[in-house]
């Protein structure tokens, strides 16, 4: 009897394509000839398929490492707690802070600069948000806004799967599942005010998307009925 060793399957094609998109974005050349993902210090923001900001963060360990942990299989607290669903991230914007590149992670002055940059980004994107909120559980400490370095923004979802991932029915189903999981976490633990705020924001986001989808259908039904009657 012949036998053969099966080759383990890799990740699904769409997952592989998105990971490739993330790597391509993080390999974008910066003005100094370096790749943006290799900036040790920096701030980042995630946007959904409506270009709505959904999460703001900072790192002093390298943008590449931190963003990859959020969006691939290396889970972070935000993902594990169902605060952030990587499926919803369509675009990334980063503010690499090259002037801090040589600073050690424990440098208090550099950390203070990073905190100010994160708050400035947070304030900037929240003011552009339809909900005046992002999904961060923790409060971002208020500081004096600072002048930000130039940012780089790009889409990480390849063209071949963008339309399917962007479809409102897919996003409604996914968002409802995320809300249910987050609500379960809240019901089973002693949680922060911030986590309840995140649940409220997610519910508002779901309601808005569901309403838009309903309004689209309402707009189509009278035309269809008129055609049937004719």
Image (tube, rainbow, N blue to C red):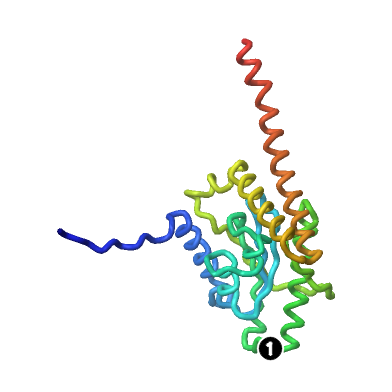
On screen, residue 33 versus residue 48, left or right, reads left
Asked where in the image residue 33 lies, by quadrant, the reply is bottom right
Q: Is residue 69 above or below residue 128?
A: below
Front-lying residue, 192 or 9: 192
Is residue 229 rendered to the left or right of residue 160? right
Figure quadrant of residue 95: bottom right
Residue at the image point whose x is 61% and y is 69% from the top: 76
Q: Residue at x 43, y 56 (%)?
A: 12
Along the line of sight, the residue nearer the viewer: 72 or 96: 72
Q: Is residue 74 above or below residue 156?
A: below
Q: Quadrant of residue 227?
A: top right
How many numbered circles does the render carry? 1
Q: Quadrant of the N terminus?
A: bottom left
Q: Is residue 185 above or below residue 139?
A: above
Tell me the residue at 69%/60% (across/down).
185
Viewer-nearest residue: 46 or 139: 139
Q: Which residue is mark 1?
A: 106
**Residue 67 percent location from the top left of the image:** 59, 69
Q: Position of residue 114 (x, y in %)?
A: 72, 78
User: Residue 40 location, x and y as percent?
Assistant: 61, 80
Q: Position of residue 84 (x, y in %)?
A: 65, 61
- The quadrant of the picture occupied by the C terminus is top right
**On the picture, is 206 further left or further right than 144?**
left
At x 79% / y 74%, what residue is drawn? Answer: 146
Q: For mark 1, does the 10 Å Cα neighbourhood hold few (<14), some (14 to 19), or many (20 or more) residues?
A: few
């Amino acid at each position: 009897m012949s036998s053969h060793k099966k080759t383990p399957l890799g990740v699904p094609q769409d997952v592989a394509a998105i990971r490739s998109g993330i790597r391509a974005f993080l390999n974008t050349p910066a003005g100094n000839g370096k790749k943006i993902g290799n900036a040790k210090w920096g701030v980042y923001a995630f946007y959904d398929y409506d270009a709505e900001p959904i999460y703001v963060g900072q790192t002093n360990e390298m943008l590449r490492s931190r963003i990859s942990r959020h969006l691939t299989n290396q889970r972070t607290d935000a993902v594990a707690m169902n605060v952030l669903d990587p499926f919803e991230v369509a675009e990334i914007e980063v503010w690499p802070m090259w002037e801090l590149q040589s600073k050690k992670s424990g440098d208090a002055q550099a950390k203070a600069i990073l905190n100010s940059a994160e708050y400035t980004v947070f304030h900037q994107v929240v003011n552009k948000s339809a909900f005046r909120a992002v999904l961060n559980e923790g409060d971002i400490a208020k500081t004096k806004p600072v002048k930000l370095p130039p940012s780089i923004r790009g889409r990480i979802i390849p063209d071949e799967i963008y339309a399917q991932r962007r479809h409102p029915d897919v996003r409604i189903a996914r968002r409802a599942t995320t809300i249910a999981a987050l609500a379960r976490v809240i019901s089973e633990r002693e949680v922060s005010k911030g986590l309840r705020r995140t649940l409220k924001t997610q519910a508002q986001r779901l309601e808005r998307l569901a309403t838009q989808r309903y309004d689209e259908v309402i707009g189509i039904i009278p035309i269809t009925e008129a055609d049937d009657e004719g």
